[in-house]
Image: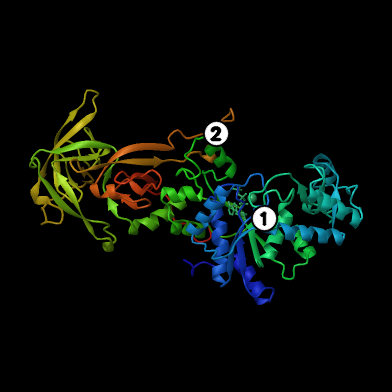
Amino acid sequence: METERSRHFIEQAIDNDLAEGVYDHVHTRFPPEPNGYLHIGHAKSILLNYGMAKEYGGKFNLRFDDTNPTKEKSEFVESIKEDVAWLGADWEDRLFFASDYFDEMYEVAVRLIKNGKAYVSDLSADEMRDYRGTLTEPGKNDPNRDRSVEENLDLFEKMKAGVFADGEKTLRAKIDMASPNINMRDPIIYRVAHMSHQNTGDKWCIYPMYDFAHPIEDAIEGITHSLCTLEFEDHRPLYDWVVKEAGYPEPPRQIEFSKLYLTNVVTGKRYIKKLVEEGIVDGWDDPRLVSIAALRRRGFTPESIRKFVELAGISKSQSSADYAMLEYCIREDLKIDSPRMMAVLDPVRLVIDNYPEGQTEMLTAPNNLENPELGERQIPFGRELYIEREDFMEDPPKKYYRLFPGNEVRLMYAYFVRCTGFEKDENGNIAVIHCTYDPLTKSGGPDPGRKVKGTIHWVDAASAGQACVRLYENIIDEEKGVYNEDGSLNLNPDSLTVRTAFVEPALMKAKAFDRFQFVRNGFFCADYKDSVENAPVFNRIVTLKSSFKLPVQGSV
Ligand code: ATP
Ligand code: MG
């Protein structure tokens, strides 16, 4: 795969920079704001930044962009570290916090003031907006724009000392109020905010703005290529202005790429926060979400996410990747490596009337027909079994090859059975199916001399375990609308189905994160939070059916 694809535009840009001697190495970073859990979109940024460092023999930093004290929590710092590590992006000993650079950022601001490149403004937020102009009209100069350096230094010092209330003063970069790029119209670089910070406590009551802080963070760490998403494209002139005016000798270069969006799935922190806070989902890692923690809990593997991000590709054009492509990637990853076991999710009893009562025999089953390395196991078989309710029909349509009165099928890894009758309960539902077996048709034995068209799975009733199984659907379909008319979230009532399944005994020993194919029912993973010893809870990662076709290179 790696060798087939052509080099994307970021690789080409880095190749050029190295060839022209702009940089002699590559150093990238992933800079999350610790204000929520990471989602599948962030995986793209993580894997791209890490991937570029690896590809060019360079370094990769994990840096928390914790310059905004209101929304940030240490719970998020921990979860982000876990997610980045799980994806395989190894930051080694390069874990940083932007808040550790507050002193240096302050010094840069003082330097800008001294160089006549920044000034303290008295404008309120509303006034600031009026002065800013529009896309078609230039802005107006701030009345405080020509304050003396001494006065600015004094006022900035007082901002830092806590003399002013929130919003009373700001520090602005002195660039150009007539710039066609609104970001360059004397942007605010420091604001007063009397708030405690989770890292620096009450040391500061002024905090740097993102557009000022981010380039300085990159420059301090010696980042060469600062890869970020497209919405920052219009901010790049300001990024370049800050690193230049701050006087860093080897300024980093910002390159933008398009975000990864998933069709039909909500990824925005805003929605996910709402679902979590309103208790609609079981936390940020509820398996119905597409946070990385949720995908991990559901049973996705890092390999499947890496493959997905790779298939989605790196470009500058906005597009969405289909959720079905993510499902394709996990199926591909699990189909060979996971054992195929039998579990009956919607059970009905099957009695083999000519099988000796009280007898149990052990049958041999391959763990994965396509992968002999996974070996074999023994499954108990007896007179009473459970099969899927949908594998029997009283009155079948044409081309139904499973059980119906008079028909013969193979019980997987076992014998041929022929249906001889059935019983119904008082509600008219099938309660028991009767059949007889042919001892000469044992799987792996001599050719029985006749064929059957259907094979069905089963579990032995006497030895089966009972396990909780959770089936998922999309919780919100963005295409159907995130909100109802009354403003409430448009939730899919079937997003979670909980079943008690009968499973073969081996499955009762499943450990957290063990993954299996349940024959015909899909791929499942033992939930790490809710499983307890000898009572696993299985999350369905994905069904077996797929309508997804691997796209031709470059078309996603
Ligand atoms: P959200 O939009 O979900 O709130 P965010 O952009 O605010 O996310 P940050 O913590 O600021 O979250 O993001 C860290 C990095 O991840 C940034 O460089 C950002 O550009 C990148 N990123 C965020 N969303 C995506 C996405 N959907 N695809 C690719 N990269 C993304
Ligand atoms: Mg952000």
Label 1 vs label 2, nearer the camera: 1
Q: Answer whether residue 556 is visible to the viewer in this image.
A: no
Residue 332 location (% of width, % of height): 39, 57
Q: Which residue is pictured at 87% across the width and 53% down the height?
A: 154
Residue 11 location (% of width, % of height): 60, 68
- Placement of 221 over or under 21, stated as above or below: above
- Position of 498 with respect to 291 (left or right) is left
Check the image and tell me how it is coloured: rainbow
Q: Which residue is pictured at 65% across the width and 72% down the height?
A: 16
Q: Is mark 1 within 8 Å of ligand 1?
A: no
Name the amino acid, label 1. Ser
Dot label at residue 48 = none
Q: Which residue is tagged 1?
A: 99
Distance CA(mark 1)–CA(mark 2): 36 Å
- Placement of 309 over or under 274, stated as above or below: below
- Position of 512 with respect to 437 (left or right) is right
Dot label at residue 489 = 2
- Placement of 444 over or under 23, stated as above or below: above
